[in-house]
Image: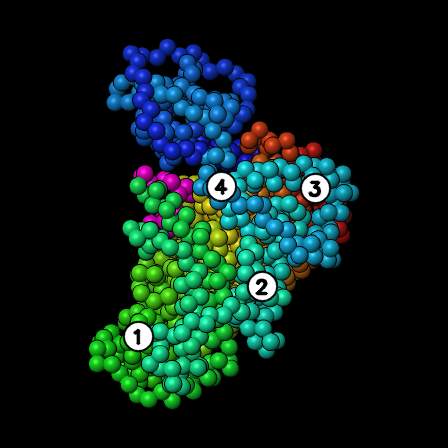
C-alpha cells in the first residue's frame, strides 16, 4: 500500500498538465496583492486540467512546465511564474493544486493568482479534460480499432491459462468486478482517441484474461515460420504487418501485404539490366525502393527529418514526457509525429518483406553465383573508404553498388548495396538509410567471415529513417556496435538484421536491436550463443505505430539493458531499461506499438532496468516469450510482465527451472493505472522473488495475473501475491482492481500469510488466489 500511494502521488503530480487549444494573447490583470482564503475540504471531482506542472511549496510553488497549446499556454502562463492560488483560494502544495483543478468542470474558467518578476498578476484560464489535452491523438478522428477474425478465434479456441483465470473469477464471485473493470479500462482508453491504436491493444483491454494471446500467437508465428517449413523471413515480416491496423489494400489469405507489385520502369539500375546480378538482386531492390517511395507522405521542405528524429529520441531518452523541452522543440516534435502518422506502413511492410526474401537460401545462392560472375569493374571515382579486395564498384542514382571478394575488406562509407563474398571484414558505414541520404534502400549481404559492423553515428548499420535497410550475414562470429538507431532500428521505415550463424555480440546505446517507431523492425539471429547489450529502447522495443521484434532461434544467450541511464524515479544505483519486449507510447502524444522479444531455446539470462521484460506503457503492448531452457530474469521497477497507463505487458516462459528476480516494485505480473499485466510460466521448478506490488498484484484499476503451470515453486515478496491495491486515481473510475495468482500444481512455498498449497480464497479488494496441489 505504501508503494502504491507513493506511485499515485508521483504520477498524480506528473499528470497535472493538459489540453490542446491554440495560443491566445490574453493579458493578465496586475493586482497590488492577493487576499486569499483557505482551500475548502471535500472538493468534488470533475477532473479538470489546465496543462501545467509545478515544483516547490508555499510561496515558492512555481510553474515548472507549461504544455504547448494547453489552456495555460493560451492564457499566457509562463515557466517560473509563482502560483499563489486560484479563484480566491490559497494554494500551497502540488496536491492542493491538483485537487482544486480536478474539482473544476471542463469548459469552465479558473482565475489564476500568479506572481511574475515580483508583480502580482491574475490570469483567466480555461479548464479542459484529458481528452482535449491530448488533442494530437484525436485530430485524425479515427474510429475504434476493428475487431478482427483472429480476435473472435482467440476467444473460442481452447486456452488453459485464459480458462483457468476465468474459472477462478467465476468461482470466487468476482465476475461483476471484472465487468466493471473492463468498462473502466475501455472508457479510459477511449478518452485518448483512437488515432494509431493497434487492434490487439484494444483486444487486450477488452478481454483482460485473454490479453496474453496477441503475444502468444505472434510469437508462435515467428518461431514456426522457418524456411524448411515453406515459410520464410518474409513470412515473419508479413505476420508482424498483420498486427498493424487493417490496410485499405486488399490483403492475401494470411493478411500479408508482401505481394504488392510495382510496374514502373527501372531508372536506377538500367545500365545493369543485362548483368547476372540484375535478376538475382537489383530488380528486387528497385521495386523495394518504389514501394518505399509510395509509402511516404510529402514532407514540409523546411523539416529536417534526420535532426527531428534525433531530437525526438534524445528527448524521450531523458524524460517520460515528450513536451519537456522548450516550445520550439515541442512544436518540432509535433510536426514530425504528424508526418510519421501518415506513412503507409503496409506499403513499407511490403518493401521490407521483399528485402527479407533475399535472406532465403535459394535467393542467397543466386546472389552469390551472380556476384561471382559479375565482370570486374571499378569506377574511377571510387572513394578510398572502400578498400581491400574490391571486385566491382559502380555508382548509381541511389549510391554505390559494391562487390567485395574473399579478402579482408573495409567498407567505410555509405552505399546502396554491398555484397561481400567472404573474409573477415570491417564495416564503418553502409547498410543504413535516411531520406536525406538520397536512396530509399540500403543493403549489406555478407557471405562469410568474422565481421565487424561498427558505426556510432546517429542512424547506424541496419537502421532506416523513411526507407528500408537490411543486413544479411550468413556465418561467422560477428560484432555489431552502434550508438543511437542501429541493428534493426526504424523510424517511418523498415529495418532488418538477419544473422544466420555464429556466436555474435550486439552492442549499442539506445533505440537498437529490433526497435521501431512508425515502422517495422526485425532482428533475427538463427544460431549461436549471443550477447545483446544496450542502454534503453532496445531488444524488441516498439514505439508509436510500430511492430518491433528481436527473435533468437537458438543458443544460450545474454540480454543486458541496465547499465547507463539513471532511474527516472531517482533511485540510486537503479537504471532505466525500456527493453526486452516493450510496447510504449509517447504519453499524451501517440499510442504505443507492439514490441516483442522471442527466444526459442537455450539457458538464457535477462538483465533489465526499469520497464523491461514484457512491459506495456501508454496504449502499448509488450511481450517476452522464452521457449525453453533454464532461464534467469533480473530487473527492477515495472518488469517481468507489467504495465502502466492503459497498456498491456506479458512474459511467457514455456519450460525450464527458471529464476525471476524483481527489485523496487511492480514486477512478475503487476498492473498500474488502467492496465493489464500477465506472467505465465508453463512448467518447471521456479523461483519468484518480487518487491512491492508483485506476483499478481494491481493498483489504480489494474488487472494482473501470475499463472504457474506446474512444478515445485518458491514465491517471495513483501506484498502482492494476489492482491488488489488502491484505486485513488481519477476517482476510482467506479471499478476495482483484480490481482490473481494461480499455481496449478507441485509443492510450493510462500512467504505471505494465507498463501499455501491447496488453498483458494478472495480478498475484499479482489485479490484472487488458488494453489491447485
What is the span of residues highlighted in magenta in the rendered image? 310-327
Tell how many labels.
Answer: 4
Q: Are marks 1 and 2 in contact (CB under 8 Å)?
A: no
The residue that appears at 55% across and 24% down in the rendered structure is 45
Q: Is residue 47 above or below residue 436?
A: above
Counting residues from the start of the chain, the first of labels 4 and 3 encountered is 4
Separation of marks 1 and 2 at Cα, in angstroms: 33 Å
Q: Is residue 703 above or below residue 409?
A: above
Quadrant containing the N terminus is top right
Q: Determine whether the residue tagged by mark 4 lies in a helix, strand or loop.
A: loop
Residue 479 position, x and y percent, is: 38, 70
Residue 618 position, x and y percent, is: 51, 44
Counting residues from the start of the chain, the first of labels 2 and 4 encountered is 4
Residue 396, which numbered label? 1
Near mark 1 (Cα within 10 A), the count class, few <14, some 14-19 or many ≥20, is some
Q: Residue 572 appears in which quarter of the rendering? A: top left
Front in this rendered view, residue 91 or 690: 91
The residue that appears at 44% across and 66% down in the rendered structure is 291
Q: Which residue is mark 3?
A: 768
Separation of marks 1 and 3 at Cα, in angstroms: 65 Å
Camera-side mark, 4 or 3: 4
Task: Find out whether residue 325 is within the magenta segment.
Answer: yes
Front in this rendered view, residue 721 or 699: 699
Q: Which residue is mark 2?
A: 251
Residue 717 appearing in the image:
no
The residue that appears at 35% across and 42% down in the rendered structure is 330
Q: Which residue is mark 4?
A: 138
Q: Determine whether the residue tagged by mark 1 lies in a helix, strand or loop.
A: strand
Residue 195 position, x and y percent, is: 51, 46
Horizontal arrangement in the rendering, residue 516 relative to residue 721 (left or right): left
Residue 283 position, x and y percent, is: 42, 77
Amino acid at each position: 500500500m505504501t508503494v502504491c500511494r507513493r506511485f499515485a502521488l508521483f504520477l498524480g503530480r506528473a499528470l497535472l498538465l493538459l489540453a490542446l487549444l491554440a495560443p491566445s494573447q490574453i493579458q493578465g490583470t496586475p493586482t497590488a496583492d492577493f487576499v486569499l482564503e483557505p482551500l475548502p475540504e471535500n472538493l468534488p471531482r470533475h477532473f479538470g486540467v489546465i496543462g501545467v506542472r509545478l515544483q516547490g511549496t508555499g510561496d515558492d510553488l512555481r510553474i515548472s512546465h507549461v504544455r504547448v497549446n494547453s489552456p495555460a499556454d493560451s492564457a499566457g502562463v509562463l515557466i517560473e511564474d509563482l502560483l499563489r492560488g486560484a479563484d480566491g483560494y490559497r494554494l500551497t502544495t502540488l496536491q492542493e493544486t491538483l485537487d482544486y483543478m480536478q474539482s473544476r468542470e471542463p469548459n469552465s474558467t479558473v482565475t489564476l493568482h500568479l506572481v511574475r518578476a515580483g508583480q502580482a498578476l491574475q490570469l483567466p484560464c480555461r479548464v479542459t479534460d484529458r481528452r482535449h489535452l491530448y488533442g494530437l491523438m484525436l485530430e485524425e478522428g479515427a474510429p475504434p480499432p476493428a475487431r478482427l477474425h483472429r480476435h473472435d478465434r482467440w476467444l473460442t479456441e481452447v486456452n488453459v491459462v485464459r480458462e483457468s483465470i476465468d474459472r477462478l473469477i467465476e468461482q470466487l464471485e468476482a465476475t461483476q468486478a471484472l465487468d466493471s473493470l473492463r468498462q473502466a479500462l475501455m472508457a479510459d482508453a477511449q478518452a485518448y482517441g483512437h488515432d494509431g491504436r493497434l487492434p490487439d491493444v484494444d483486444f487486450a483491454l477488452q478481454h483482460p484474461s485473454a490479453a496474453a494471446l496477441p503475444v502468444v500467437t505472434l510469437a508462435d508465428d515467428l518461431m514456426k515460420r522457418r524456411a524448411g517449413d515453406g515459410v520464410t523471413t518474409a513470412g515473419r515480416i508479413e505476420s508482424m504487418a498483420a498486427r498493424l491496423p487493417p490496410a485499405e489494400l486488399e490483403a492475401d489469405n494470411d493478411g500479408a501485404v508482401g505481394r504488392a507489385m510495382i510496374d514502373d520502369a527501372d531508372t536506377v539500375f538500367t545500365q545493369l539490366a543485362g548483368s547476372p546480378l540484375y535478376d538475382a538482386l537489383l530488380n528486387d531492390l528497385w521495386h523495394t525502393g518504389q514501394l518505399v517511395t509510395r509509402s511516404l507522405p510529402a514532407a514540409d521542405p523546411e523539416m529536417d527529418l534526420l535532426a527531428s528524429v534525433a531530437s525526438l529520441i534524445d528527448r524521450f531518452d531523458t524524460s517520460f514526457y515528450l513536451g519537456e523541452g522548450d516550445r520550439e522543440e515541442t512544436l518540432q516534435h509535433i510536426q514530425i509525429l504528424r508526418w510519421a502518422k501518415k506513412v503507409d506502413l503496409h506499403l513499407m511492410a511490403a518493401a521490407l518483406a521483399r528485402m527479407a526474401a533475399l535472406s532465403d537460401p535459394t535467393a542467397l545462392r543466386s546472389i552469390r553465383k551472380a556476384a561471382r560472375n559479375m565482370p570486374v569493374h571499378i569506377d574511377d571515382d571510387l572513394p578510398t573508404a572502400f578498400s581491400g579486395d574490391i571486385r566491382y564498384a559502380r555508382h548509381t542514382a541511389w549510391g554505390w553498388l559494391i562487390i567485395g571478394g574473399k579478402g579482408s575488406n573495409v567498407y567505410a562509407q555509405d552505399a546502396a548495396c554491398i555484397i561481400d563474398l567472404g573474409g573477415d571484414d570491417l564495416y564503418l558505414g553502409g547498410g543504413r538509410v535516411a531520406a536525406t541520404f538520397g536512396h530509399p534502400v540500403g543493403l549489406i549481404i555478407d557471405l562469410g567471415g568474422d565481421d565487424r559492423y561498427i558505426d556510432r553515428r546517429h542512424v547506424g548499420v541496419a537502421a532506416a529513417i523513411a526507407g528500408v535497410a537490411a543486413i544479411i550475414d550468413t556465418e561467422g562470429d560477428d560484432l555489431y556496435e552502434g550508438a543511437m538507431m542501429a541493428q534493426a532500428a526504424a523510424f517511418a521505415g523498415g529495418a532488418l538484421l538477419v544473422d544466420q550463424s555464429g556466436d555474435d555480440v550486439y552492442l549499442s546505446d539506445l533505440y537498437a536491436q529490433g526497435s521501431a517507431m512508425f515502422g517495422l523492425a526485425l532482428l533475427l539471429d538463427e544460431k549461436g550463443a549471443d550477447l545483446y547489450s544496450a542502454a534503453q529502447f532496445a531488444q524488441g522495443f516498439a514505439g508509436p505505430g510500430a511492430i518491433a521484434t528481436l527473435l533468437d532461434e537458438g543458443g544460450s544467450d545474454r540480454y543486458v539493458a541496465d547499465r547507463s541511464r539513471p532511474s527516472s524515479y531517482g533511485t540510486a544505483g537503479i537504471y532505466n531499461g525500456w527493453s526486452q519486449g516493450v510496447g510504449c507510447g509517447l504519453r499524451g502524444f501517440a499510442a504505443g506499438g507492439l514490441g516483442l522479444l522471442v527466444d526459442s531455446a537455450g539457458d538464457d539470462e535477462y538483465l533489465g532496468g526499469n520497464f523491461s521484460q514484457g512491459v506495456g506503457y501508454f496504449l502499448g503492448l509488450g511481450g517476452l516469450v522464452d521457449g525453453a531452457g533454464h532461464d534467469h530474469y533480473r530487473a527492477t521497477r515495472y518488469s517481468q510482465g507489467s504495465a502502466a497507463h492503459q497498456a498491456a505487458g506479458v512474459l511467457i516462459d514455456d519450460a525450464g527451472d527458471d529464476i525471476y528476480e524483481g527489485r523496487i516494485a511492480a514486477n512478475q505480473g503487476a498492473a498500474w493505472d488502467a492496465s493489464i499485466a500477465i506472467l505465465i510460466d508453463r512448467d518447471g521448478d521456479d523461483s519468484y522473488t518480487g518487491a512491492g506490488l508483485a506476483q499478481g498484484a494491481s493498483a489504480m484499476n489494474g488487472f494482473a495475473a501470475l499463472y504457474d503451470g506446474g512444478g515445485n515453486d518458491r514465491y517471495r515478496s513483501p506484498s502482492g501475491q494476489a492482491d488488489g491495491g488502491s484505486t485513488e486515481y481519477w476517482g476510482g473510475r467506479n471499478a476495482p482492481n483484480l490481482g490473481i495468482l494461480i499455481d496449478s500444481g507441485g509443492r510450493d512455498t510462500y512467504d505471505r500469510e494465507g498463501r499455501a498449497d491447496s488453498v483458494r480464497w478472495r480478498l475484499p479488494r479482489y485479490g484472487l488466489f488458488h494453489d491447485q496441489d
